[in-house]
Image (cartoon, rainbow, N blue to C red):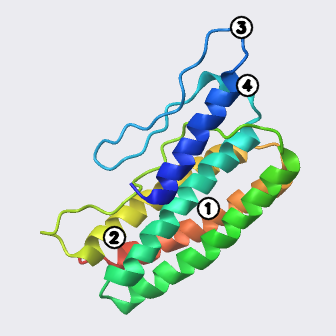
Amino acid sequence: MTRRVIVWMLCMACASTIAACGSTEAVAPTPHVNMSDHMLHPTMNPADLALPYDVRFIDGMMMHHLAAIDMANAALQSATDPKIKELAQAIITAQSAEVTQLRDWRASWYPDAPMTAGTGADMGTMQVSDDEAIAYDIRWLNAMIDHHQGALTMANEALANAEHAELKTLVTAIIADQTREIEQMQAMLPK
């Protein structure tokens, strides 16, 4: 698991703990992750469900994008195919800009909302397999395809549930971009 994802999860756990302080109600469990076959599935904190969908989506997609950026940075170091390195750089550039936009919206729309575990949608693979019997480039492509499919699941859910038109516009772009990138990565895999 990458350092950014760990820091993000610790922030969410701390925010939930702080939010629960002083409450006379039963304290809800803090969010945690269950790693199984390198899949990240945040367990929803019931208190998160009281928050607007948009803030939960923003938090989840920022965490998802930060993991993709980490995976892409790793590809810049370890991939051998120049096309993969080019795609990795494009992912870093696009998703860094989207994280900045999401952070700005969160600060503007939900300045006092605690950090959340996201919407509970399956985020897909969050790291590249360590199985060195398979070439790194193939492992990276498979992991990023699965990761992008997780983003598509999240984005399609947001199209149906988001309140802010700006967010719906962004998720429409995410769907188009990541669908195109999935097709591009599938074409790079050996037949």
For image coordinates 69% across by 21% down, the residue present is: 21
User: Residue 75's quadrant in the figure?
Assistant: bottom left
Labels 4, 1: front one = 4
Q: SS at mark 2?
A: helix
Q: Which residue is mark 1?
A: 175
Is 186 left or right of 54, judged from the image as shown?
Answer: left
Q: Which residue is mark 2?
A: 140
Distance between the Cα atoms at labels 1 and 3? Answer: 42 Å
User: Residue 46's quadrant in the figure?
Assistant: top right
Please name whichever residue, 106 or 119, is drawn nearer the observer in this view of the structure. 106
For image coordinates 38% across by 91% down, the residue present is: 82
Q: Amino acid at mark 1?
A: Ile
Q: SS at mark 4?
A: helix
Mark positioned earlier in the residue sequence (3 or 2): 3
Distance between the Cα atoms at labels 4 and 3? Answer: 17 Å
Q: Which residue is mark 3?
A: 24
Is residue 50 depicted above or below 65 in this figure? above
Neighbour tally class for label 3: few under 14, some 14-19, many 20 plus, Cα within 10 Å: few
Q: Which residue is mark 4?
A: 50
Distance between the Cα atoms at labels 3 and 2? Answer: 47 Å
